[in-house]
Image (cartoon, rainbow, N blue to C red):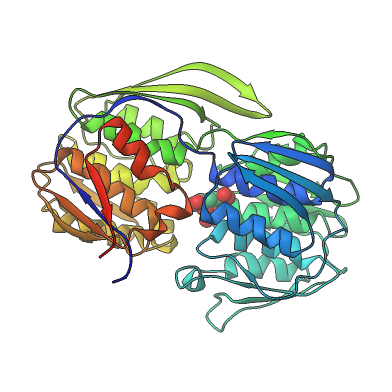
Amino acid sequence: MSDSIIFTVQPGGSLNGEIRVPGDKSISHRSIILGSIAEGTTHVTGFLEAEDALATLKAFRAMGVEIEGPDDGKVTIYGVGLKGLKAPEGPLYLGNSGTSMRLLSGLLAGQSFNSDLTGDDSLSKRPMRRVTLPLAQMSAQIQTEEDGTAPLSITGTSELTGIHYDMPIASAQVKSCLLLAGLYAEGETTITEPAPTRDHTERMLQGCGYPIERKGNQVSITSGHRLQAVNIDVPSDISSAAFFLVGASIATNSSVRLNHVGINETRTGIIDILKLMGADITLTNEREVGGEWVADIHVKSSQLKGIVIPEQLVPLAIDEFPVLFVAAACAEGVTVLTGAEELRVKESDRIQVMADGLQQLQVNAEATPDGMIIRGGDIEGGEVISHGDHRIAMAFAIAGLRSKAPIVIRDCENVNTSFPQFLSLASELGLNIAQNKP
Ligand code: S3P
């Protein structure tokens, strides 16, 4: 932590202007994965040039896929087809990226070669049994550490068999992992989800002409078909836009327009929750781009009020809770989140780390096993630690818009995993933030 980046945010100010935040992280990962195993050349635009998506890109290069770029968000992938990947020479290092590890474990289980997946300290602590257990039911051979964490050692097999899996948790990573394994499994693989989760994998598979069946909360895939390369226009990431949706809502005299943001309905929980809290958010220019919906989003200052967050919105806003907790701290009254225990196994324990940081800033925040209770009020200045979690770092930076004294945020290096331009775009809109190495 000591040699990491520190953000210092001066209190107050407004956010104003019009920006386009970088490309969607989930869709960027999937563009590389599906582009690599498609037949033909995939041209990607709007690709997220951040560490997580680049980890996926490098992994496929290491498996023999020729990939040009990224260059100003443009990537060209020369697909090798479903059977064209080659054994990597060493372990595939996936940094901080849970999406890379979980999706790749499914894809690699059915290859004709073995592979090892490794990650940084945070990723090496995250639960992988959620993918290795159902994959084992499909006859995959994957070794983990004793406690079910990475490194993963995968013995490729041609003997995968389709299963019907009722997911115990609402996870798009698990669903996507099993769909990718299903491309190589004998027979049909069906996944049932307990609540809707992001469906970018399904949309992109269909976009590549691969037949899948979607019925209610169930999705099925059968091996034996091919993926055709298509061009992919990655929308801006609503999870990055979220910082400014909250920022412009809580700051005075603010008005921000966020252009070309992905508004896939499995991702818009942040908008629904903020609107329930009284936020002034309007969507214009809604259009479909390559199978995903996008819009320009306009947000203005408003007095937010505390709410009980409906549990069905939790998976649809799962990455946005760090900054939503900041919104709750600025709201009138009490905000209650339940049903969000998944937050404890993200890049950090986002319930504990956010509660600790908010308390450090004298906010009345109480962690609960599956959520948080926050009583809105004043935010004081102080020093907080992001615990290497990109979204925690950016959430506390946004808190500066309403704090009474500077906020110092330690350990901000990993903002580069999802949103390297955060500092410059936030400054452009009016956040008084500086970065320094200690
Ligand atoms: C993601 C799914 C979510 C999300 C993560 C990205 C994806 O994880 O938190 O940032 O791209 O599929 P879970 O599937 O673990 O909920």
Is any atom of residue 311 visible in this view? yes
Q: Please name the residue shown 26% across and 29% down the image.
A: 15
Q: Please tell me which residue lies in front, 197 or 237.
A: 237
- Assign the C terminus to one quadrant of the image: bottom left
Q: Residue furthest right?
A: 224
Q: Quadrant of residue 216?
A: top right
* Residue 283 picture location, percent across and down: 44, 19
Q: Does residue 170 appear anywhere in the picture?
A: no
Give the mark count: 0
Q: Is residue 4 above or below residue 276?
A: below
Looking at the picture, how far across and down is residue 82, in whole percent?
85, 54
Q: Quadrant of residue 298?
A: top left
Instruction: Tell me if 177 is positioned left or right of 304 in this view.
Output: right
Image quarter in which the N terminus is found: bottom left
Farthest-out residue, bottom: 146
Where residue 141 appears, x then y in whole percent?
Answer: 75, 76
In this picture, is 96 found above or below 318?
below
- From this view, report whether residue 169 is shown above or below residue 423: below
Q: Nearer the viewer, residue 289 or 374?
A: 289
Q: Residue at x 86, y 69 (%)?
A: 112
Rendering coords of residue 385 (x, y %): 26, 62
Left or right of 233, for residue 77: right
Residue located at (54% from left, 37% from top): 266
